[in-house]
Amino acid sequence: MSIDEVLKELDTTFDGLSDVEAKARLEKYGFNELVEKAKVSVIKIFIDQFKNFLVGLLIAAAIISAVIGEHIDAFAIVAIVILNGVLGFIQEYRAEQALEALKRLAAPKARVRRNGSEITILARELVPGDVIILEPGDRVPADARLITCTDLKIDEAMLTGESIPVKKNAAIILPEDTPVADRKNMVFMGTLVTTGYGEAVVVSTGMNTEMGKIAAMVQEVEKEETPLMRRLNRFGKRIGTLIVVLCIITFVLGLAREMDPVLMFMTAVGLAVSAVPEGLPAVVTITLALGVKDMAKRNAIVRRLASVETLGCTTVICADKTGTMTKNEMTVRKIYVNGRIIEVTGAGYEVEGEFLFNGETINPAEDPHLELLLRIGLLCSHAELVKEDGKWKVLGDPTEGALVVAAAKAGMWKRALLKDYPKRHEIPFESSRKRMTTIHETKDGKLVAYVKGAPEVILERSRFILEDGNVRLITDADKQRILTIVREMAQSALRVLAMAYRVIPAQFEFIDTDQVESELVFVGLAGMIDPPRDEVKGAIEQCRRAGIRVVMITGDHKLTAIAIAKEIGLVEGNNFMVLTGAELDKMSDEELTKVVDKVPIFARVSPEHKVRIVKALKRKGHIVAMTGDGVNDAPALKLADIGVAMGIKGTDVAKEASDMILADDNFATIVRAVRDGRAIYDNIRKFVRFLLACNFDEIAVITTCILAGLPPALLPLQILWINLVTDGGPAVALGVDPPDEDIMERPPRDPEEGILSGMELFILASALFQFLGTMAAYLLGMYLLKDSVAEARTLAFVQAVLFELFVVFNCRSEKHSAFRIGFLTNKALVIADVAGLILTLMLVYAPPLQVIFDTVPLTLYDWILCILLASGGWLVLPEIFMKPLPFTKKSRQVKS
């Protein structure tokens, strides 16, 4: 079918659908998405809580208890298992919901034309009849028939297996039975735009697309096992094996002492379940998932959980200047044309502004040179200026947007101008060429090429210059004068583009790209500024204090980059090194590696240079975060330890190659993400520290009692209660603990550092203090204060619970005591501790629970004794033992 026939069949136009019609079609055809794989059901999440060896051991113990008549113990064990399963289910369900939220945040978008204006919508909201706009780096969001295209090539490998991009042709008409691989006038969902520009009308969405027909892959945020989780799994298995062996020894020793076999079996089971840190990987997953959900609220969308660990180790952040360190609201400030520098007033994207020369207003309509320069900038672009909610907004590239806004200040609008100068062809911008060309038909039927690009590139290809209404040969002196003006503009932090044109002497179909863009007539320069973001200066200073280097990477002029770098505090004075892309090309990899640590600014670089920069930094031992937004940035993003894609101006390819997406394209968001990454890792260390510090002493207490011929100080149900119920709340609360105030005042963590590094002495000391306190309470109750084992055990049980409720506050920091950081700065922890205390009071004073857990009521003096024994270690620990062992803590080393 021809283009007109397709548009008629779909009841649409080149201007696209209306909002009302699009809504009606969405209800008719449904969302543009493939059928997803079945999600993990709520029931399965709950059942999975009971699918592990230790829970099976507990259930076996409950069955044995029921068989031998210990029905109360059996009921209690089952109740504890169910309660623990419910708590685990709630946390894992929240983690699943967090990952689903991330998936929605990372959902692909599409540029469409509706009501005659370009807008960006979620790709799932596309409907047949929508007109979509395609540019390099885009994933085609639906099956569509091309209605116009320029040098458009599509990578259809994922659909056809053909690795060579397919050149498309909108004008061609093909039979309906043409194979997919040969449909040159169609684009298909999921394929990739590699070069060129195109517009197409959607013909199929969702499962009706070619991708849907062959049940292609589903975009999904997959769960993954991070390096930390793998290390914890290995750690858990090693320590689990050791503890199970100790439990067996404890059981055998008890039998040798002629103790009750059932009691000894239950004790061994209780110790194994409570002491084996099998749940650590699950808690890590929950903490990471909830942490990245919070990060997403702050515009940092983490695509891979493992990246959170790496963020805390980052030593270098390589950031694009434009849009990341700056506001990405380019505004033309100066225009050089016909030997004059014209000032342009106005702020941001507002269309009110004047053109001033020597303080006097110029009317562009009466100034042919100025009018031509503005016309070239307007027509040689894809950007659109639209008004939304009473505010002007640029759709497309901000640099092109500045030119469109400048033209609007002169009363020039693209749609109206295209009627007088219809576009016939386009040579798209490419970073390697640093220029773009559009070819238009003039009112007298001639063809003219409008070219914009980097000044040095345009000057090199210019043979003539427009001056005083005449075209003459351009001289070397002219070029030097123009380059001097470029440098002066760049020193004022202006980004400079040059404009030129060429009248085509013959039909453009027979002229190659190089011929069109040669022998140009130079028209003038447009100097635009993209002001720095307000928060960037503070973020760079924060990086400096945190031991993180910031490197600016830009395609802009060297002097522009230096001006912005000084303004944001990246460099001071003139004693620093700047490398340009041309200089990089002359350096070997070894030479670059030697100097890369001394270079804070890379200017006039291409995406290919980014790869070399990342490799050089990694050879020096750095953990590198690299930003990118274009198709060609993908290799650098994949190579970096943390690839950071732009959420607003980033292409789909860049996003897919990244580890993290900045929803606001803001450099300060990267720094906040590093801070959050450090905080999440710290919190994982906190609850690992707490759980291990609290669990090891019980083995020692029971083993000591058996060796001494004493009844066990803690009964199996009491041990299970302490570790599976009392400890659960505080451990989860530590996972959301606020970060230390000095978290960005310390150097990056060594990625090879163990999870326990620096905490060994505290864990051992804590276990020792709890062991001594528990044994002291038990022996005092046994021989001095009480006359029954039940009362002594209750004292030991309460002391153990209180110690853990106290010591959890000292697990919040590796440097400061609870008194220094405050008790109320983590309200969740306070609530968890209060809940733990209330539950303990219930076990001690509620008659039904007294029967189940073999406890007796305690007097006020008993509580004072338990508090003194529990608080002694809690008060002493931070002052004496809150220091790393000298041979365990690693410092971050970078190769010199």
Image: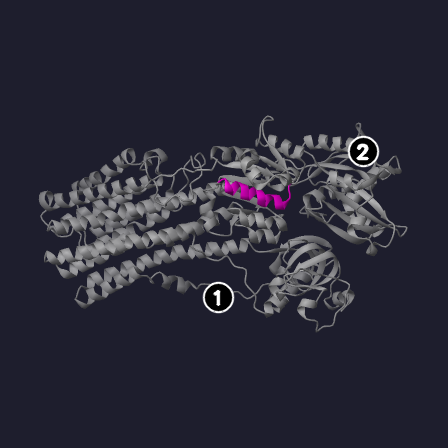
Residue 674 position, x and y percent, is 48, 42
The scheme the figure's colours follow is one colour
Magenta highlight: main SS: helix
Residue type, label 2: Asp
Mark 2, other Cα within 10 Å: few <14 / some 14–19 / many ≥20: few
Mark 1, other Cα within 10 Å: few <14 / some 14–19 / many ≥20: few
Asked whether, in this view, residue 820 is left or right of residue 718, the answer is right
Residue 768 position, x and y percent, is 22, 42
Q: Give the quadrant of residue 609.
A: top right
Would you place residue 716 above or below residue 405 in this image? below
**311 or 201, which lies in front?**
311
Q: Give the quadrant of residue 477.
A: top right
Say if residue 106 shows up in the picture: yes
Residue 7 position, x and y percent, is 75, 65
Residue 48 position, x and y percent, is 37, 62
Q: Give the quadrant of residue 831.
A: top left
**In the image, what residue occupies the spot 77% across and 63% down?**
171
Query: Which residue lies under the disc numbered 2?
Result: 476
Circle 1 — which element? Answer: loop
Looking at the rendered image, the disc whose residue lies closer to the viewer, 2 or 1, is 2
User: Which residue, as the protein is rendered here, is positioned at the far right?
Assistant: 444
Say if residue 859 shows up in the picture: no
Residue type, label 1: Ala
Circle 2 — which element? Answer: helix
Query: Which residue lies under the disc numbered 1?
Result: 38
